[in-house]
Image (spheres, rainbow, N blue to C red):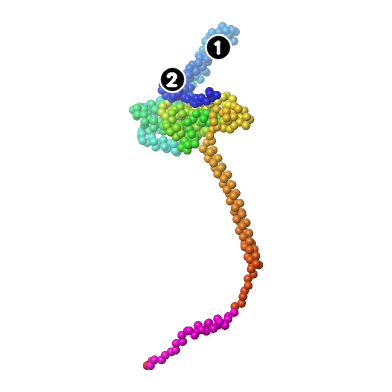
Amino acid sequence: MSQRTERRGIHVDQSELLCKKGCGYYGNTAWQGLCSKCWREEYQRARQKQIQDDWALAEKLQREEAAAAYGSSHGVPAQTQSTPPTHSSLGPFSKFEEKKTNEKTRKVTTVKKFFSPSSRTASKKESPEVKTTSPSMSRHARLDFDSDQVSRDFVEFLKNFQRPGREIHKQCRSFLLSMSGKKDLNAEELSECVQDFYQSMADRLTSHFKGSSEPVEQVMDQVEKYIMSRLYKSVFCPETTDDERKDLAMQNRIRALHWVNIQMLCVPMDEEIPEASENVVKAITDIIEMDSKKVPRDKLSCVTRCSKHIFAAIRNTKSEPASADDFLPALIYIVLKANPPRLQSNIQYITRFCNPSRLMTGEDGYYFTNLCCAAAFIEKLDAQSLNITPEEFECYMSGQASPRVPNPTGNDWHHRDTLPYPAEPPSPALAQLHRNLELLSGLCSRQETLMGEARRLRDDLLSWPDSVQREVHNVMEKHPLKVLGCTVSAMDDNADNADNDLLPLPLTPQVFAGS
């Protein structure tokens, strides 16, 4: 039991986030812990080795096949044949490899030609080839480039650079046209093409701005926005990958882990605090919003905003700055609560097509590396990670019990009293819901009382006239009304005459002389 009470939490050393090659850049689980630069070098080295191995195997098979064919035609056993195959026997395979090599060379050198002094002439010469390789690019599709809002913003931005801006726009359009004819490439090859274009463009801009990094980053951000908004539909979650399968597996995994609470992950956040709860809701909103963006930089910005809201929520709870050890468990908790749509596809999309400088350094690269670690942790989450027993983990995963509800069967190992953690307090939303239900229940009882009083008042008002009428009738019966006649006595008559005697005599008219 003492072992159960020791909380380990989730801890990832900051050195584990860096590239395993020791270059100092941030690594990525999708690149086996390497940064984008080292991963490309390893990928190209492994690809060249694979090509050489395939070539050696093909030559060996061709020699064995030629020796077997020679022995069968001359009646010589195949074991005694050591005749090397002729050059003509390797003709079909050599032509195939030569075509593949030429295509690879053309793909790598095309971007370099964009920045050469004769790029204007080269683009004119290559334009018929591009049109032939991409017949689906009609006149209406090319006009759509100019009418789209992204294109207008890109052109407006490049006006500040005058002639270099026109050259950048021309190179981007040429690259998009060339990419339209490469729909048969897999995701890694498409990523390699885009990254080659980024690298060549960045080298050209660095030499143009004489080493100033700020304008180079601004131009590269706009180039990425323009390029990837056009390629989004064809390169996001392509059919040649298993990204969709990984998305479904991740969503099902997060749904199965719905019972994981803050205490199990040792997250230093208290959602009862209004400020912390508000930041948690904003973080969930940002990580869900990532799927609605098309540009890798915009998706990366959603991850950055989500991470900053997480740090704010931890700071509101602890009243002190959050540490890196607090951040990763909180990010895992946010991902479990949000269950972002197509999480793996978005991570792969950012990994393949984002400007590599953003993923290798800076806060964007740090937050994205932690998101990759959170996704990998969720995939491998087990009982030991949550400091619970395997029996409890399997019971919670199967839905037979929950750490929030006591088990009615009476088994001690997943009863509330014997759980490794106390029952999780309800979230602020659920607490508010319960308070509202209690208020509604009180209002209902008060309304019923009020309606009863109103009905009694109505009955009283209806019966009041009858009761008044009965009371008046009873009074009238007990005390009947008697009307007496009016008589005048002689005394009253003499009194009136006496009053008349006291009145003065009436005036008589007088006549004056001379009138």
Identify the residue at horizontal 49%, vertical 18% (top origin).
50
Q: Residues within 10 Å of mark 1 (few under 14, many from 20)?
A: some
Residue 21: mark in rendering: 2
Regarding residue 163, the answer to whether it shows in the image is yes
Q: Which circle's residue, 2 or 1, is located before the other in the chain?
A: 2
Identify the residue at horizontal 56%, vertical 28% (top origin).
419
Residue 253, by quadrant, is top right
The C terminus - image quarter: bottom left
Work out whether 503 lies above or below 222: below
| Location of mark 1 (residue) | 64
Amino acid under disc 2 = Lys
| Separation of residues labelled 2 and 1 (CA atoms) | 42 Å
The stretch of residues the image draws in magenta is 487-513
Residue 76, by quadrant, is top right
- The residue closer to the viewer here, 389 or 312, is 389
Identify the residue at horizontal 44%, vertical 26% (top origin).
195
Identify the residue at horizontal 37%, vertical 36% (top origin).
159
Q: Residues within 10 Å of mark 2 (few under 14, many from 20)?
A: few
Amino acid under disc 1 = Glu
474 on left or right of 351: right
Q: Tell whether position 350 is magenta.
A: no
